[in-house]
Image (cartoon, rainbow, N blue to C red):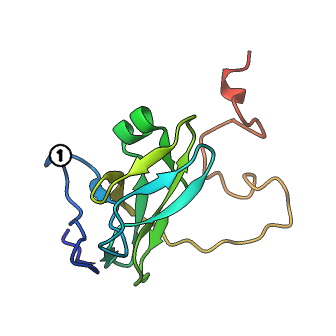
Amino acid sequence: MILQYHMLRGNAHPPLRANPSDAGLDLRWTPNEAAETLFKIAPGESALIPTGCIFAIPHGYMMEIKNKSGVAHKRQLLVGACVVDSGYEGEVFVNLHNVGSKIQILQPGDKIAQAVIVPAVAVRFMASEDPNIYDWYPITISNRGTGALGSTDAT
């Protein structure tokens, strides 16, 4: 599959895989102004970080912005919910959260996240009058029931 992208600013970095077999394309901080040289994220704060790129995501797919394991582990910067839908024509931003105890400083071009292209199944939801939603048609082989949040490990 080939997807088009466009770099909005002259200082933008193309989305690239570090290795040919990597699932994700590295995204980097691309400041809105060339004069911007540092970006600080204090502990407990979140920031929308511009990538300088727009992407043409085809119908039936989405781009999911994920953590880079090294950035998450070494810098405690985690990606918040980031889904880029097909048809979105704007710049992609990364929602970064500093979950650590130190101020994190980004420099232009720093890797901040990775983008993965994922199939998005188009479904139509149908309301049910009966709360026993699996009784109508057996669409699962699970007997999980209403167990949640660790219930599969309960003895």
For the question of whether residue 81 can be seen, the reply is: no
39 up-or-down from 57: above or below: above
Q: Quadrant of the N terminus?
A: bottom left
Compared with 28, 74 (above or below) is above
Above or below, comparing residue 25 to residue 69 in the picture: below
- Determine which quarter of the picture holds residue 128: bottom right
Residue occupying image coordinates x 34% and y 58% = 115
Relative to 2, 103 lies left or right: right
Quadrant including the C terminus: top right
Q: Where does the image place residue 50, in percent across and percent down from the top left?
A: 41, 68
Residue reaching furthest to the left: 20
Answer left or right for 23 relative to 72.
left
Q: Nearer the viewer, residue 32 or 96?
A: 32
Q: Is residue 89 left or right of residue 16?
A: right
Residue 132 rendering spot, x and y as whole percentages: 81, 52
Q: Say few, some or many: other residues with alpha carbon within 10 Å of mark 1 (under 14 / 14 to 19 / 20 or more).
A: few
Residue 66 % position (x, y): 42, 51
The answer to whether any part of residue 84 appears in the image is yes
Residue 14: give x, y in percent of width and height.
Answer: 20, 66
**Residue at image coords 38%, 41%:** 71
Residue placed most toward the observer, 52 or 79: 52
Secondary element under disc 1, as helix, strand or loop, is loop
Q: How many numbered marks appear?
A: 1
Q: Is residue 11 left or right of residue 155?
A: left
Q: Nearer the viewer, residue 93 or 19?
A: 93
Name the amino acid type tagged 1: Ser
- In the rendered image, which residue does mark 1 sit on? 21
Q: Residue at x 45, y 70 (%)?
A: 84
Residue at the extreme front of the image, as rendered: 35
Look at 50% across and 72% down and name the residue there.
Answer: 122
The quarter of the picture where residue 25 lies is bottom left
